[in-house]
Image: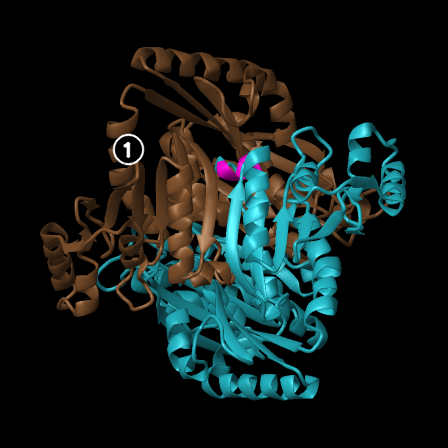
Chain colours: A brown, B cyan
């Protein structure tokens, strides 16, 4: 089955917005084993929209169109499609009633522009939009199934997942069962993961019964495994077998099988479960660790806070790092990191403490201590440990990696 | 002049990567007043690539193709194009020499795969890639100008800006002068900016001689103004006149005309110039202000550091906020914010100090102090000021807005 995705809207062609819908839709189809072969975007232009629909009808089995379903005058995708397909539009009672009640809740009345959104293809289907006004309308033209969805990502996703994909699956490929797993990793570059796993599949993009893909959110990489089979338990077994092979090879880097989890959310969860508290003393990461921890709602239960000791004076005055240490070993040294972690432990009495001092660059490096040098000191279960790292990456990436190293260190112990 | 953008690569169609190139290229052409009418993506498939090129030749004047120029076997865009255009590929000496010297610098020798990258269209142009191996190759087929660029965004951008656009401008539209200005704003939502400015132009997307667009990087919005005219000084005057009108209406929200500047970079610059230091005491923002300031290289000259006093114990023990204040007024109160800012001033002796305490949510709100309540206290030039805000936004947005409010407050004074 061949899928084409068409997005409609001047704002995309003018570069005013980034079209993220296509990746989401492609990925969703890929999960189900369907091949997306064409992406097209055209302006709000009747001729261009019509041409794009006709071309898609020739080469694709399923076409997903987004955009141009709004209530305003320049939203006319469905009208153009009806003309192109030579089919009538009729008012759909279910959609109309849903629109009326949706607008009522907002204290508004149905106007003519909204009423337009209740017009659907004769002999086509309509699917209600749970998070907005524009429904998804469907029509089969010359054997090709067209689905028209709103371009607002939240509405598109809701309709795609709750209506379009189930409808396609029930009519097209009910004989297949699909299973997917996400493995979140930190500590191994994508190219190295690829290298360690590449013999597990034949073709990165399309393969029978199992597929592995990588998604980078640097410095992290998520491994996505999808399998499909006519027999559900066979699919489950196959998934288990592929995932086991992946764990055997790169298990040390995998920290979660849940897409929504992050190093910071896992750490907050772990500390909450164990009734432990955490505090931080940050120099080169400048508050990034604190920021990442407090991104998580509920962090206040376990994260007491910290000190961003960017200047030496703050290391001395707030963290009680002695001037001698800084004079003798420098602010970027094992001795300073250890004094910092002792200082924050003393100040906060937290069960777990982390301190980090390093050179994020691009300036400030020397021959002995080049940009990328970092000293990390941790206190875990009353024991102090130290780690020296060399991470010669650009400033932002350096800071992300250092903060992730510390979060992972507390997770691993 | 009509522009079409084609990207080639299985990874895009499979949804493995988000294609950000099209927005960048579209925006770049739009800046110059050229209309991008079509976006297309196809797989690494000879037939599909050929069909896409032929269709583009029919409907566009300029075609920008990205992807499939790498040294590996599945990179064959140029070979397919040559077949499609029925033109020979010839080895280009300039490109070959550049490749050899580039590889030499990395201690590598030219292999057959790399040599492939030196093959260009007979009677076509080639432009050297300053940041990678694949050059940009150009060919005019049936009156349509095709440019083939690498898909790696950094390489694409470098070639587009330094070679492709200048080449197009010199050959196509030398009669026009284009002027652009970016106005970075904070504090006014996009819809409100749009409302205040919308009578300044007739059509948001394409208009003669002046165009205004918005780019959201929430909570900030950048206003982009572009004008063009055959007469350069007329273009300059027109730009000045539109920009003046914008300042008259929304000037209070504009903080920079330089795309690269941010609230944090401007503040660091201002403090450096005035030889002043800054420190922070953060509760609800949890280190985000510190993180944003230290994102800027050179922050260490002026930013001393701060305390993330997430727990009350840290407010008391590190910032010397009295237990009485917390018991009597609560941690989210004017009194606590003021005690925090005095505490950080005492600890760090910084010239400028900021303290913030609030309820980021989603939990922790009450009837008297709902989620979104914030107290900000600042010390500027020895004077303490306080501000109570109510920002009922999701956690992440809440924290971004609060941190921006504080950065802007120091910039404004």
- Residue shown at the point (65%, 59%) measured from the top left: B296
Our reading of the magenta stretch's main secondary structure is helix
From the viewer's side, name the closer residue of A173 and B354: A173
Residue A218 visible, this orientation: no
Which residue is located at x 20 percent, y 62 percent? A116
Q: Quadrant of residue A341?
A: top right
Is A78 displayed left or right of A361 in the figure?
A: left
Task: State left or right for residue B4 relative to residue A100.
Answer: right
Q: Is residue B187 above or below residue A343?
A: below
Residue B86 in sight in this render: yes
| SS at mark 1 in the image | helix
Q: State yes or no: residue B12 in magenta.
A: yes
The quarter holding residue B347 reads: bottom right
Q: Which of A104 and B313 lies nearest the eye of the viewer?
A: A104
Residue B271 at x, y percent in the picture: 66, 72
- Residue B214: x and y in percent read 48, 69
Describe residue B206's horizontal placement relative to residue A80 as left or right: right
Whole-percent x, y for residue B179 in the image: 64, 77
Q: Nearer the viewer, residue A402 or A36?
A: A36
Numbered-mark total: 1
Q: Is residue A41 magenta?
A: no
Where the N terminus of chain A falls, by quadrant? top left
Q: Which residue is mark 1?
A: A168
Badge 1, how many Cα within 10 Å: few under 14, some, many 20+? few
Considering only vertical position in the picture, is B107 above or below B385?
above
Disc 1 chain ID: A
**Residue B277 to residue A351: above or below:** below
- Residue B188 image offset from top left, x and y in percent: 42, 74
* Residue A20 to residue A190: above or below: below
Question: Which residue is at 42% across, 66% downward?
Answer: B337
Region of the chain picked out in magenta, as a range: B9-13
């Amino acid at each position: 089955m061949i899928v084409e995705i068409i997005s409609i809207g001047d704002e995309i062609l003018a570069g005013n917005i980034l079209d993220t819908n296509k990746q989401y839709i492609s990925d969703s189809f890929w999960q189900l084993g369907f091949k997306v072969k064409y992406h097209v975007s055209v302006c709000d232009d009747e001729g261009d929209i019509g041409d794009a629909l006709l071309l898609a009808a020739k080469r694709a089995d399923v076409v997903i169109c987004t955009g141009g379903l709004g209530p305003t005058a320049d939203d006319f995708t469905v009208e153009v499609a009806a003309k192109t397909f030579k089919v009538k539009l009729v008012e759909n009672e279910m959609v109309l009633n849903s629109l009326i009640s949706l607008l009522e809740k907002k204290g508004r009345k149905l106007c003519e522009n909204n009423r337009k959104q209740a017009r659907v293809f004769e002999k086509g289907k309509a699917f209600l939009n749970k998070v907005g006004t524009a429904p998804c309308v469907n029509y089969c033209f010359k054997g090709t199934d067209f689905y028209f969805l709103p371009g607002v990502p939240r509405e598109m996703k809701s309709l795609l997942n709750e209506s379009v994909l189930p409808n396609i699956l029930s009519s097209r490929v009910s004989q297949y069962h699909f299973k997917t797993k996400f493995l979140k990793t930190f500590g191994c570059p994508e190219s190295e993961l690829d290298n360690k796993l590449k013999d597990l599949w034949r073709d990165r993009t399309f393969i029978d019964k199992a597929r592995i893909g990588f998604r980078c959110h640097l410095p992290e990489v998520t491994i996505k495994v999808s399998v499909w089979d006519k027999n559900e338990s066979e699919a489950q077994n196959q998934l288990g077998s592929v995932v086991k092979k992946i764990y055997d090879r790169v298990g040390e880097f995998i920290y979660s099988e849940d897409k929504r989890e992050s190093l910071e959310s896992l750490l907050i969860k772990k500390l909450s479960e164990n009734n432990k508290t955490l505090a931080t003393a940050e120099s080169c990461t400048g508050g990034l660790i604190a920021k990442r921890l407090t991104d998580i709602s509920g962090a206040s239960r376990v994260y007491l806070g910290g000190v961003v000791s960017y200047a030496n004076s703050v290391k001395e005055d707030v963290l009680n790092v002695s001037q001698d240490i800084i004079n003798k070993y420098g602010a970027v040294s094992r001795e300073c990191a250890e004094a910092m972690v002792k200082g924050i432990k003393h100040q906060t009495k937290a069960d777990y403490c982390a301190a980090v001092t390093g050179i994020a660059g691009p300036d400030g490096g020397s021959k002995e201590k080049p940009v990328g040098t970092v000293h990390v000191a941790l206190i875990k279960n009353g024991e102090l440990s130290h780690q020296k790292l060399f991470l010669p990456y650009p400033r932002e990436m350096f800071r992300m990696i250092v903060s992730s190293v510390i979060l992972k260190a507390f997770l691993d112990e």
